[in-house]
Amino acid sequence: MLVTLDTPYVDTSAADLSLALGDEERPALHVLELDLPAGVRLRLRLLGASHQVVLRAAGVELTETVACLPGSPPELPATRLDEANGYRFTATVLRPAGTELSDRVAALRAELAGDPYALVGVFPGDVDAVTALAVRPDPPDGTVSWRTWHAYPQTNELVLTETVVATVSARSEPGLRAPQSRAEMAL
């Protein structure tokens, strides 16, 4: 789902982002609620300062916020693992050359605009100022996963994140491995 947001975005660069788990739900500019198999409920939330995902499933309650968080020092880890709770987060910051940022953002908007498991927010003033979230609708049994993109045209940065969360039954399986990123993670 592609939405045009009616507010300027707060983020100024990738360096201003932080990751918070268990954060309260913050005011959202747009929300997409999803019901997935096995009783998994997700709320994809576009914030003026990036994104928030709220996950509710049997045995799992999680709120992930990637945003400019007032009162918190900016720190977006490249990786965060919590094996005991079945949580895996990765983040990458790209600085594309030339028009590559615009090309990637245009491809992302086109790919996700009609996807019922995706939410793309375009901020006013620049079509490349985008925050996008996409849920993997068919993850391996016992996992839920989503990806996000945060484009900052003023600093020519694209932040990619991927999160995988294992449900209670999957956490008890020996050798559980998170699914691989889809090819479009490189968008």
Image (cartoon, rainbow, N blue to C red):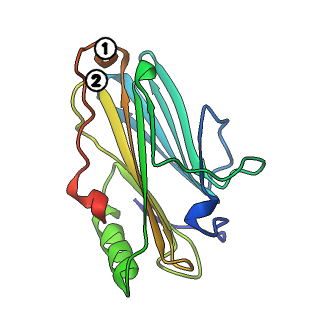
> Measured along the vertical axis of the image, is residue 23 above or below residue 11?
above
Residue hosting label 2:
142
Farthest residue to the bottom: give it: 98
**Snapshot quadrant of residue 8:** bottom right
Spatial CA distance of label 2 from label 1 is 6 Å
Horizontal and vertical percent position of residue 159: 46, 61
Q: Residues within 10 Å of mark 2 (few under 14, many from 20)?
A: some
In the rendered structure, the answer to whether residue 23 lies left or right of residue 31 reads right
Please name whichever residue, 127 or 69, is drawn nearer the observer in this view of the structure: 69
Q: Quadrant of the N terminus?
A: bottom left
- Going 66% across and 55% down the picture, which residue do you hit? 68
Horizontal and vertical percent position of residue 163: 40, 41
| Amino acid marked by disc 1 | Ser
Horizontal and vertical percent position of residue 114: 31, 61
Q: Quadrant of the C terminus?
A: bottom left
Report the disc number at residue 48.
none
Report the disc number at residue 169.
1
Please name whichever residue, 92 or 183, is drawn nearer the observer in this view of the structure: 92
> Measured along the vertical axis of the image, is residue 44 above or below residue 113?
above
- Going 55% across and 77% down the picture, which residue do you hit? 155
Residue 157, visible in the rendered structure: yes
| Amino acid marked by disc 2 | Gly
- Going 61% across and 31% down the picture, which residue do you hit? 22
Q: Are marks 2 and 1 in contact (CB under 8 Å)?
A: yes
Number of residue marks: 2
In the rendered structure, the answer to whether residue 50 lies left or right of residue 56 reads right
